Image (cartoon, rainbow, N blue to C red):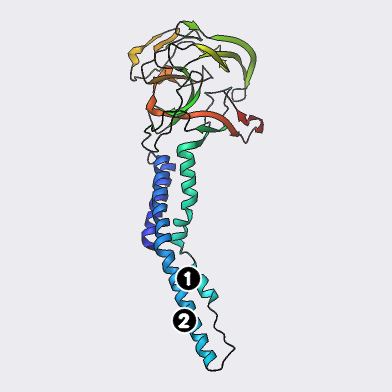
């Protein structure tokens, strides 16, 4: 078993190392699932086979020691040096190959369940969601808000809440589903979304956009125009009630024209001009945009997000090592 376990652990290390070095395209959900299954098998084997064997061996050793002591007592020898405590402890001890498998199962299982069905941590790698989310923010994503999904397969098994305009959502990047992206939901199925001359319009209604204090962007060491936008709430095109308020950035030096547009499913639903883009969101899809409007690779460039690509709703910054004041909920 030691040789087999060494081979299994080496396979896990090799997979993780190849992924880290960019030699393969890894899948963390699959890695966690396999680790849970493998360590779970070892844990069951430990509970029902290996541990009972070690207990039986320790009990047999103790029985032999008790028998030897009784024989000595029968001969009138009351002081003996028969002590098997240390030997029994060695027999009870898990070998290294069980310690590194069955011993890790409870921790791996808890992490797998939490990450797969409840909350998953993410790190913000880029500035596309500034000023709402900053580079280095460590956020939590609610995995059950939109319905519980099976890990790896991503098959939805509970209904959950409908996606609503204004939600900050993590999803699998349509051109490369192994990557996770985070953007704000701008359009739901049936919506006609227009972003022309940096003015957002949904179903013919211009979205309110009020001037706020300029935002200082540390990377470029300059001030960028900041606005407060009020997105109409709703989970379908016929719902346009209330509003969700958030801030966004517009760079006056960047043109409204959208360069480098890729081919994507339902691209015929979009019309591009020098002023921007107008799109009709197809059924079962969503139109996403970053709050840093002129520095965000989003649905304007690569198209719509299908419902099957949804990961969860982002809602809380739990740490930013560069700025502890960033900790807290956001919209």
Q: Nearer the viewer, residue 85 or 207?
A: 85
Q: Nearer the viewer, residue 138 or 108?
A: 108
Distance between the alpha carbons at the discs numbered 1 and 2: 15 Å
Q: Is residue 213 left or right of residue 303?
A: right
Residue appearing at x 44%, y 64% in the figure = 51
Residue 91 disc label: 1
Q: Is residue 208 above or below residue 17?
A: above
Is residue 22 visible to us here?
Answer: no
Give SS at disc 1: helix
Quarter the N terminus occupies: bottom left
Within-10-Å neighbours for mark 1: few <14, some 14–19, many 20+: some
Quarter the C terminus occupies: top right
Give residue 21's quadrant in the image: top left
Q: Position of residue 193 (x, y in %)?
A: 44, 11
- Residue position marked by numbered label 2 in the rendering: 64
Give SS at disc 2: helix
């Amino acid at each position: 078993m030691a040789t087999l376990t060494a081979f299994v652990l080496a396979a896990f290390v090799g997979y993780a190392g190849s992924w880290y070095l960019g030699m393969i395209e890894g899948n963390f959900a699959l890695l966690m699932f396999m680790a849970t299954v493998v360590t779970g098998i070892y844990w069951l084997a430990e509970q029902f086979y290996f541990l009972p064997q070690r207990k039986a061996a320790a009990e047999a050793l103790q029985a032999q020691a008790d028998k030897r002591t009784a024989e000595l007592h029968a001969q009138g020898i009351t002081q003996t040096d028969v002590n098997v405590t240390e030997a029994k402890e060695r027999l009870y001890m898990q070998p290294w190959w069980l310690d590194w498998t069955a011993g890790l199962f409870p921790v791996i299982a808890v992490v797998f369940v939490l990450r797969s069905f409840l909350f998953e941590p993410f790190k913000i790698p880029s500035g596309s969601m500034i000023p709402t989310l900053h580079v280095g923010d460590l956020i939590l994503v609610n995995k059950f808000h939109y319905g519980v999904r099976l890990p790896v397969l991503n098959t939805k098994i509970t209904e959950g809440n409908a996606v609503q305009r204004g939600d900050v959502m993590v999803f699998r990047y349509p051109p490369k589903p192994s990557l996770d992206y985070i953007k704000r939901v701008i359009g739901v199925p049936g919506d006609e979304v227009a972003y022309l001359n940096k003015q957002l319009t949904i179903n013919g209604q211009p979205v309110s956009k009020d001037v706020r204090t300029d935002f200082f962007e540390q990377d470029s060491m300059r001030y960028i125009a900041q606005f407060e936008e009020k997105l109409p709430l709703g989970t379908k095109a016929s719902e346009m009630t209330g509003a969700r308020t958030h801030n966004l950035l517009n760079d006056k030096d960047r043109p409204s024209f959208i360069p480098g547009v890729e081919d994507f499913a339902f691209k015929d639903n979009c019309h591009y001009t020098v002023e921007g883009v107008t799109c009709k969101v197809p059924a079962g899809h969503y139109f996403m945009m970053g709050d840093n409007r002129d520095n965000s690779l989003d649905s304007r460039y690569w198209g719509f997000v299908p419902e099957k690509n949804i990961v969860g709703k982002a809602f809380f910054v739990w740490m930013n090592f560069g700025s502890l004041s960033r900790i807290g909920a956001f919209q």
